[in-house]
Image (cartoon, rainbow, N blue to C red):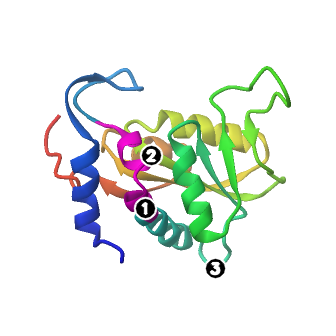
Amino acid sequence: MPTARPELARAIAEVALLRGSFTLRSGRTSRYYLDKYLFSTRPELLSQLAEMFAERIALVAGRTPPDRLAGAELGGIPLVTAASLATGIPSLFVRNAKKDYGTARQLEGRLEPDDRVVFLEDVATTGGQALEAVNTLREAGANVLAVICVIDRQEGARENAEAAGIRFEALFTKHDLGITDD
C-alpha cells in the first residue's frame, strides 16, 4: 500500500539526508547532502517514486503520453527504469559523454526524430546536469516536454530550466523533506 506523500518525504530524508561539509556537482558547498543512491536503491521507496513519476508524467504530457522517458547516468537510471515500468513508456539513458567503444553512443535506447521525451532527474541544485542531458536529447532530435526531479534543492534549477524554455517539476522540495537551512 502506498505511503502518503509526507511520510514518503520523511522516509527519503531519513535514509538520504547527510549532514557535514559537501561540494556539490555545481561547485557550491553545502552543509547537507541528499544521497540519491540511498533512496534510489531502496525498492520500497523507489516503487512509490515510480508511481509519483507516473502521475506527474501524465500531468505534464497531457492527453498524449510521451514517447520516451530519459534519465542520465548514473543516478537517473534506476529512476527512469522504475518510471518506465510503472508507465509502460520506453526509456532512454543519457551518458555524460559518448563512449569510445562499441556503438560510441551518448544515448542508449531508441530515439526517433521528434519523439516527445520527459527527462527524470534525482536531486536538482542548479539543474546543470539535467540541462546538459536535455541539450543532448534535443541535438538528437527529441522534443523535451519537461524535467521532473525527485528533489528540488531550490537553488536555481527551476529558474535555469525555465530560462532554457523547459518545464520543471519536482516531486519534493528540500522543505518537504524538512530541510530549512544550508
Q: Is residue 85 magenta?
A: no
Residue 145 image position (x, y, % from top left): 61, 58
Q: Which residue is mark 1?
A: 49
Image quarter hosting the N terminus:
bottom left
* Number of the label disc, if any, that sits on residue 179: none
User: Looking at the picture, which amino acid does disc 2 mark?
Assistant: Asp
Q: Which residues are magenta?
A: 34-47
Would you say 161 lies left or right of 69 here?
left
> How far is disc 2 from disc 3 in space, using C-alphas?
25 Å
- Mark nearer the N terminus (2 vs 3): 3
Which amino acid type is shown beneath numbered disc 1? Answer: Leu
Q: Which residue is mark 3?
A: 63
Front position in the image: 92 or 141: 92
Secondary structure mostly taken by the magenta-highlighted segment of the chain:
helix
Q: Residue at x 53, y 44 (%)?
A: 76
Helix, strand or loop status at disc 2: strand
Q: Is 127 situated above or below 3?
A: above
Give percent across and percent down for residue 71. Answer: 59, 46
Q: Secondary structure at mark 1?
A: helix
Q: Position of residue 62 (x, y in %)?
A: 59, 75
Q: Is residue 81 left or right of residue 106?
A: left
**Left or right, 131 with reference to 35:** right
Name the residue at 76% across, 58% down. 115
Q: Is residue 42 magenta?
A: yes
Which disc is residue 122 wearing? 2
Residue lying at the far front in this picture: please name it.
43
One can see residue 174 in this view: no
Q: Tags 1 and 2 in contact by the CB under 8 Å rule? A: no
Query: Is residue 138 visible to the viewer in this orientation of the structure?
Result: yes
Q: Nearer the viewer, mark 3 or mark 1?
A: 1
Is residue 130 left or right of 149 when viewed as pictured? Answer: right
